[in-house]
Image: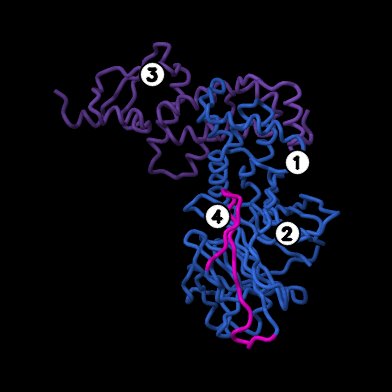
Amino acid sequence: MLLSCPVHLHHFIYLFISTPSPPLTTTQTQTAPKAAAMSNGGTLPMDIVIDILSRLPVKSLCRFKSVSPEWNSLIFVPYFAKAHLNRAKTQNLKNLDQKIIIISTHHNLYLVDFADVNPTITILADFSSVRIRVLSSCDGLLLVSLVDNSNFLWNPSTREYKVLPTCPFALGPVRGVFRDVYGVGYDSSTDDYKVLKVVYNETETDSPTERGITIGAIYSLKTNAWRKIQDTIDYVPFWTTSCGVFFSGCLHFLCWKRTGSFVIVAFNLSDEIFREVLLPASFCEFEILDYRVAVVGGCLCLADLGRSYVIETTGGWMMKEYGVRESWTKFPIDVPKRF
Amino acid sequence: MASSIENNNEKLTLKSSDGEEFLVEKHVALQSTLLQNMLDSDCSSADVIPLPKIDARTLALVLGYCKKHADASSSKQGELNSFDSEFLKDMDMGALFNLVLAANFMEIKGLLDIAAQKIADTIKDKPHQEVREIFHVENDYTPEEEAAVREENRWAFEGFP
């Protein structure tokens, strides 16, 4: 089973100054605080040096941390990371979706680079001893789950990661059907990356329309803490097919409404309100389990992946104008030959 | 008495750090935000404008860039792009540094952009020791610290000394 999620690997996020466990982090804590009192780095003023460095690929930057302690701390500071990310985003508009991370056999992460005429495949990481799932991604950050249900945020470009603290809220009774879905996204109003966890508990005896409850919690990277969403949520997320897809400031999940219909639910990370994105009017709801929410070509999409194993072309719906139900348009998807 | 027609053909004089004077047409000078602001604030065009940080060789290059972009503003972008890459093609690092400093001082955004990008493209695949020399950075690391930082980023050093 292949699960793919589009990630731009140019994106470069140094948010993990408190990277927890790799060895040799002692030098990081010594050098990082120096950044604010930066002096002239040589013949060029620091703002020009920053401008030049923000144009470099991550691999060069990680090498150039060895130039001097000053450069090392410079490459660590958040505003540098932001300049780098913004430049990568602008440049990637021209060659969108050229790099994709694919996880296979729950062990290896591969990077497929479609920028070449002959797409190249490289192994990004080998988790041969653990089983992992990539739950969601945003700006090149991956939210990864381990077999023991612990989660971490991982930046494969820099090989940095941060283990999330365990969610302290007891999210409902643990009996009957239990499912949890996650999404990671960026809140521009607070300049923070957030993880949303939505848990649904279905008890065996309740009536079909009333059964189960859905509750949620939000993790903030800035505070490194979980916070519970006060109200219960009126939607039931699909477990197997719904991981949060970040687009336009919102995390999107495929959900089942208590009225019996299906909908894409958009959770806005700034005002923290759930809103509905209606499915195409002529959508055949029987096929809903075949679909995934995705972002293609700068539009929110529903991609039919359920039949991609038996046919060569499949299809999808593209919401050309976000939030406008009438703008859903069908498009074909070519299924690539199996690796 | 200067008539309005003469004003349109107005020229101004720029003086480099090594004392050379350059007569520049006003519409060419307007490529520089610094000069534009000076002209807007009633700075007399009869005066010689000193640019104490920019030598004659660099200033000649800068004005060549400005003239091409001022004259070609209505022509095709592709032509300007090929001019830009040809303009920087065989420039050494010292000349690029001077150019980026001049563009920064004179606030010529387009020139700053292409010169900074050229420097980035040039150093991208260089070893860090060479980059250290290019940027005249003093290495304050102890050998132990340097080894530790390198070890943390070992993956980025594949194929490098």
Residue pictured at 48% horizontal, 25% vertical: B101
Respond whether the residues carrying marks 3 and 4 are from the same subunit.
no
Q: Nearer the viewer, mark 2 or mark 4?
A: 2
User: Which-is-in-front pick, marks 3 and 1?
Assistant: 1
Mark seen at residue A186: 4
A234 left or right of B16?
Answer: right
Amino acid type at circle 3 is: Leu
Q: Which residue has dot 3 on it? A: B51
Q: Of B94 and A198, which appears nearest the observer?
A: A198
* In the rendered image, the vertical position of residue B51 relative to residue A4, given as above or below: above
Q: In the image, residue A221 lies at what x, y percent?
A: 59, 50
Chain identifier, colour blue: A
Q: Residues within 10 Å of mark 2 (few under 14, many from 20)?
A: some
Q: Position of residue B110 (x, y in %)?
A: 45, 36
Hue used for the chain lettered B: purple
Residue A221 painted magenta: yes
Q: Is residue A183 above or below residue A287?
A: above
Q: Quarter holding the N terminus of chain B?
A: top left
Spatial CA distance of label 4 from label 1 is 25 Å
Q: Mark 2 highlights which residue?
A: A145
Q: Looking at numbered disc 4 in the image, what kind of residue is underneath it?
A: Tyr
Q: Give yes or no for contact between labels 4 and 1 (Cβ–Cβ under 8 Å).
A: no
Q: Are marks 3 and 1 on the same chain?
A: no
Q: Quick one: which residue is furthest to the right in this view?
A: A129
Q: Judging from the image, what secondary structure is the residue with disc 2 in?
A: strand
What secondary structure is marked by label 1? loop
